[in-house]
Image (cartoon, helix red, strand yellow):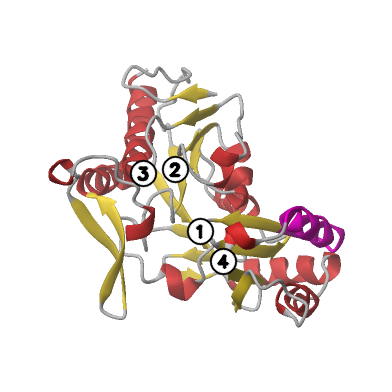
Amino acid sequence: MTTLSAGLEFPAIRPTENYSVMVACDLDQTLIYSANSMALRCSDNAAPALVVAEVYEGAPISFMTRTAWNVLERLVHGAIFVPVTTRTVQQFRRVNIPGRNRGYAVTTNGAVLLHDGVPDAGWTYLIQGAVADNCAPLEEVYDHLLGPTKPAAVLRGRVAENTFVYCIVERNELSVGYLEELSAWCHERGWKTSMQGRKLYCVPSPVSKEAALAEIRRRHPVDVLVAAGDSKLDAGILQLADAAIRPAHGELDEAAFHLANLCVTSTSGIVAGEEILRVAAAYIRSQVMT
């Protein structure tokens, strides 16, 4: 595991004449940030210029630094850029960033594969079949998580596109061992869990970002896959990647997640999103110039 720095040297890969790179990037708390997750650690007059990346009901709610936006604009012309998110299709369509509707995107944690903004019905059919064959029903998990016996710390929940459950929790008020017990209960039923800030996710195991990303790479083979993400639901795409990056915050950072080919940003919060894109762009340039 390597901490990023200005002098970081990437593994040398000898490019071919048609050398190609795919950059797959998680969105929330990796590429875009809410006002509450920016974690700016500088004086107000030294704060980076920001660009609005998402508007909801007329109000800006997600942001990137201006530098990150500019780097991403260049990156989408030098690589195949794939946004990868647990957001539903509707939530994803609120996000306005360079490359959003160009090529493939992974939404709903891998249950939906978009191509030029249009859901791939064949992929959804395959995933739904795998869930039906291998996982407990959604209703059983929902009732366990949000039924009459739910802890008071679990405040409210929703079902995302009839695929998985997520809820808002008071994390500090959860009983000791609750998350571990829930994870074990879900695992026995073919589901997995992820705790991201105040959001607790329960997702069928076949619904994964890495499965959808592997399908995209099968359809569009590339020489190198670069991937970035911050949560346990992103671990699979980092393991799939030839070069993996995670920010120095979030669920994976709390777990000290590492891989031999993994780099960790030297910054956290919204500035880490900028660093991730700088590294991905530098990686592309370094390989092309090798």
| Residue 269 in picture, x, y percent from top left | 37, 45
| Residue 193 in picture, x, y percent from top left | 69, 58
Marks 3 and 2: which is nearer the front?
A: 3
In this rendered view, identify the residue nearer to me: 100 or 279: 279
Q: Residue drawn 17% across and 46% down?
A: 44
Magenta residue span: 176-192
Marks 2 and 4: which is nearer the front?
A: 4
User: Looking at the image, can residue 34 be seen?
Assistant: no
Instruction: Tell me which numbered mark, 4 or 3, is placed earlier along the sequence.
Output: 4
Q: Secondary structure at mark 1?
A: loop
| Residue at which label 3 appears | 273
Instruction: Tell me which numbered mark, 3 or 1, is placed earlier along the sequence.
Output: 1
Marks 3 and 2 in Cβ contact (< 8 Å): no
Q: Amino acid at mark 4?
A: Thr
Q: CA distance from mark 2 to mark 4?
A: 19 Å
| Residue at which label 2 appears | 23
Left or right: residue 127 compared with residue 49: right
